[in-house]
Image: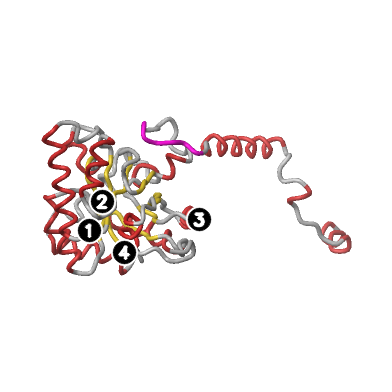
Amino acid sequence: MAKEDKVRTTDFRMMKKEGRKITMLTAYDYNSARIQDEAGVDSILVGDSLGMVMLGYENTLPVTIDEILHHAKAVVRGTKRALVIADMPFMSFQVSPEKTVENAGRFLKEGGATAVKLEGGREVLPQTRALIAAGIPVLGHLGLTPQSIHQMGGFKVQGKVLAQAEKLVEDAKLLEEAGVFGIVLECIPAPLAEKVSQSISMPTIGIGAGKGCDGQVLVAHDLLGLSGDFSPRFVRRYANLGEEMQKAFSSYISDVRSGEFPGEKESFSMDEETLKRIYG
C-alpha cells in the first residue's frame, strides 16, 4: 500500500499479516485532520474524548450523536488518505441493535465516516452483528471503556486479575467472530495485550497496552501537550504546544496594549491625494 493510497478497513488485517504497525490518532477539526493526514497517519478516530478536550466535559458521558457528527464532518473534509472512524457515544448503541444501526448509519451517511467504534465485548455482540450485517464496519474496544467508568470505579487499569484477563481474551475472540475489523485495547497490562494480539487474526490498537499490539492510538491533544497538567502514564508528549500557545497569546496581548501591534508591516496605506481629500 503506497503512502498516497486510501486506507480501507480491509487494509488493517493485511497490515497485521505483514507486520506493519498501524498508526491512529484522534482529531476533531478540519486542520488537525488535514495535518495528520499529510503526515501519513493510517487512521483518524473522531473520539468521544472530544467531550473532554474540546467541550470541557468532566468525562465522555455527556457527548451526543450530533456533537460527534459535527466534528466528524470537519475531519472528513480534511482527510484524503486516512481511514476515518466515528465513536459511538454513550447510549447511542446500548438501547437495541435496531437503534444502534440507525444511529451508526448517520455517521456514515451524514458524517462521511467509513466505520464506527463501540465499547464493550460480549454484551454488545447483538449490536455489533447488526451493524456488520447492515454493511457498517466496526472497530471494537475492550479493557478500560470510558463510558463505563462509574461501573469500573474510575479510570483504572483492567485485566490485572485472572478472571478479568480470561474474559478479555474471550471477548476479543467473540468480537472477531462477529466480524470487527480491529479492536482497541485500552489500559490493560502489556503481557495481556500481547496475548490478545496473538490470539486473533484481527489487529489490535493499543492505548496504554504496551508494544505487543498491532498498532497504537493516542489522543492528539495529549501528545501535543494541549491538555494542561493532565498526562496519563501511557502518553508520550512529542511537543508542548500548550506552553507555546500561551507565550504567543501573551506576546500578542502585550503588543496590542503597548501599541506595537499592528505596525506598519501589518497596515495598509493609501495615495497622498486621497488622503488629503479625506482630511480636507
Q: Is residue 77 left or right of residue 15?
A: right
According to the image, label 2 marks what residue?
A: 183
Q: Is residue 193 left or right of residue 220?
A: left
According to the image, label 3 marks what residue?
A: 31
- Find residue 85 and name its label: none
Q: Secondary structure at mark 3?
A: helix
- The residue nearer to you, when weighing 170 against 27, is 170
- Tell me if mark 1 has few (under 14), some (14-19) or many (20+) residues whose alpha carbon lies within 10 angstroms of its own: many
If you read the primary sequence from the N terminus, does the residue marked by circle 4 or circle 3 appear first? 4
Q: Residue 10's image quarter?
A: bottom left
Q: Which image quarter holds the N terminus?
A: bottom left
If you read the primary sequence from the N terminus, does the residue marked by circle 4 or circle 1 appear first? 4
Q: Secondary structure at mark 4?
A: helix
Give how far across and how far down residue 165 sits, in percent.
16, 37
The magenta segment is: 233-238
Report the Cα–Cα distance between label 1 and label 2.
Answer: 7 Å
Nearest-to-viewer mark from 4 and 3? 4
According to the image, label 1 marks what residue?
A: 180
Is disc 1 in contact with disc 2, using a CB cutoff of under 8 Å? Answer: yes
- Tell me if mark 2 has few (under 14), some (14-19) or many (20+) residues whose alpha carbon lies within 10 angstroms of its own: many
According to the image, label 4 marks what residue?
A: 10
